[in-house]
Image: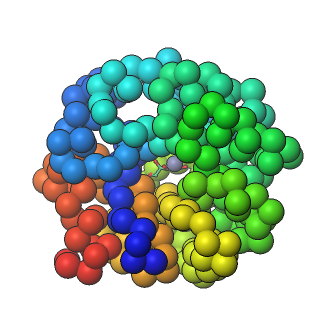
C-alpha cells in the first residue's frame, strides 16, 4: 500500500464553469496531481455534463494529467474522441461495457492509462478477469451522476479486496475513490487502500479556496489533520 503515492484529483464537476480555465490553473498551482473530468450522458446516469470539446479546452489550460471518467453507455464509441482531445487516463464503467476486455485494449492502444470504474453495488470480483489490463480502478463511493452526495462507507471493504487482488498479480494499480470525499471520509478511504482521492465539492467549494481544499484532503488522508 505504501508504494502507491497519494494523489489528489479535483473533479471539475464542482468548478465554476464561467471561469473553468482559471479554476484548473488554481488547482494545478494548489497541488493537484490529476484533473478529474466527469462525462455523463443522461443515459448511464441521469445527468448530462461535458464532452471532448471541453476536455480539449481543459488540456490547453494545464499540464496535469487528465483523468476522464466516462459515465456513459457504449463508451467504446467515444474512447478515441476523448484520447484525441487529450485524455491521459480513461475509465469506463464495468456496468456499461459488455465487451470490457476489448474496450480496455483499445484504451491502451490509444496510448492512455487504462481505467475501470465500478458502481457501489458491483463486487470486486467483477474486475478480476481484466485486472492485468488495468492501471487504475475507480471505486465509486456514491451512486454516479451528481456531485455533493454522501459517502457510502460500505464500499470500503471492496477497496481492501481490490488492493489485495492487485497485490496477488503483482501489478501496480491505482485505486481511486470518487464521491463524497472530504476531510471526514478521506482517511477511511486511504486506510482501506485507496491512493487517488477525487474531490469535487471538497476542493472547488472549499471555503478557504481550492489550494486549501486540496491541502486539507491530503492532510486528512495522511492523518495529519
Ligand atoms: C459523481 C462523479 C464525481 C463527482 C464527485 O458521479 O463521478 O467525480 O464529481 O463530486 P463530490 O466530490 O462533490 O462528491
Ligand atoms: Zn467521477
Q: In which quarter of the image is residue 12?
A: top left
* Percent x, y of residue 54: 45, 22
Position of residue 154 in the picture relative to residue 126 (left or right): left
- Residue at 22 percent of width and 56 percent of height: 213
Location of the N terminus (image quadrant): bottom left
* Percent x, y of residue 71: 64, 42
Position of residue 111 in the picture relative to residue 42 (left or right): left
Residue that lies at the very extreme toward the left in this rendered image: 208
Camera sees residue 149: no
Location of the C terminus (image quadrant): bottom left
Q: Quadrant of residue 15?
A: top left
Q: Which of 168 and 30 is in front in this view?
A: 168
Position of residue 22 in the picture relative to residue 157 (left or right): left
151 lies above or below 79: below
Residue that lies at the very extreme toward the front in this rendered image: 170
Camera sees residue 55: yes
- Residue at 67 percent of width and 72 percent of height: 169
* Percent x, y of residue 110: 63, 31
- Residue at 86 percent of width and 46 percent of height: 98
204 lies above or below 56: below
Colouring method of the image: rainbow
Position of residue 54 in the picture relative to residue 114 (left or right): left
* Percent x, y of residue 165: 67, 75
130 lies above or below 61: below
Amino acid at each position: 500500500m505504501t508504494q502507491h503515492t497519494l494523489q489528489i484529483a479535483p473533479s471539475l464537476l464542482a468548478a465554476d464553469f464561467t471561469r473553468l480555465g482559471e479554476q484548473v490553473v488554481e488547482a494545478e498551482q494548489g497541488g493537484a496531481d490529476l484533473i478529474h473530468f466527469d462525462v455523463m450522458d443522461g443515459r448511464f446516469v441521469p445527468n448530462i455534463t461535458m464532452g471532448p470539446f471541453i476536455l480539449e479546452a481543459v488540456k490547453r489550460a494545464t499540464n496535469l494529467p487528465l483523468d476522464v471518467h466516462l459515465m456513459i453507455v457504449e463508451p467504446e464509441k467515444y474512447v478515441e474522441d476523448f484520447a484525441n482531445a487529450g485524455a491521459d487516463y480513461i475509465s469506463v464503467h464495468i456496468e456499461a461495457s459488455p465487451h470490457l476486455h476489448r474496450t480496455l485494449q483499445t484504451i491502451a492502444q490509444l496510448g492512455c492509462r487504462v481505467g475501470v470504474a465500478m458502481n457501489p453495488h458491483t463486487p470486486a470480483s467483477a474486475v478480476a478477469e481484466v485486472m492485468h489490463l488495468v492501471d487504475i480502478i475507480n471505486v465509486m463511493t456514491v451512486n454516479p451522476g451528481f456531485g455533493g452526495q454522501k459517502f457510502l462507507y460500505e464500499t470500503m471493504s471492496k477497496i481492501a479486496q481490490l488492493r489485495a487482488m492487485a497485490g496477488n498479480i503483482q501489478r501496480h494499480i491505482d485505486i481511486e475513490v470518487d464521491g463524497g470525499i472530504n476531510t471526514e471520509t478521506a482517511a477511511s478511504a486511504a486506510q482501506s487502500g485507496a491512493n487517488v482521492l477525487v474531490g469535487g465539492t471538497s476542493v472547488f467549494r472549499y471555503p478557504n479556496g481550492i489550494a486549501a481544499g486540496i491541502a486539507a484532503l491530503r492532510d486528512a488522508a495522511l492523518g495529519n489533520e
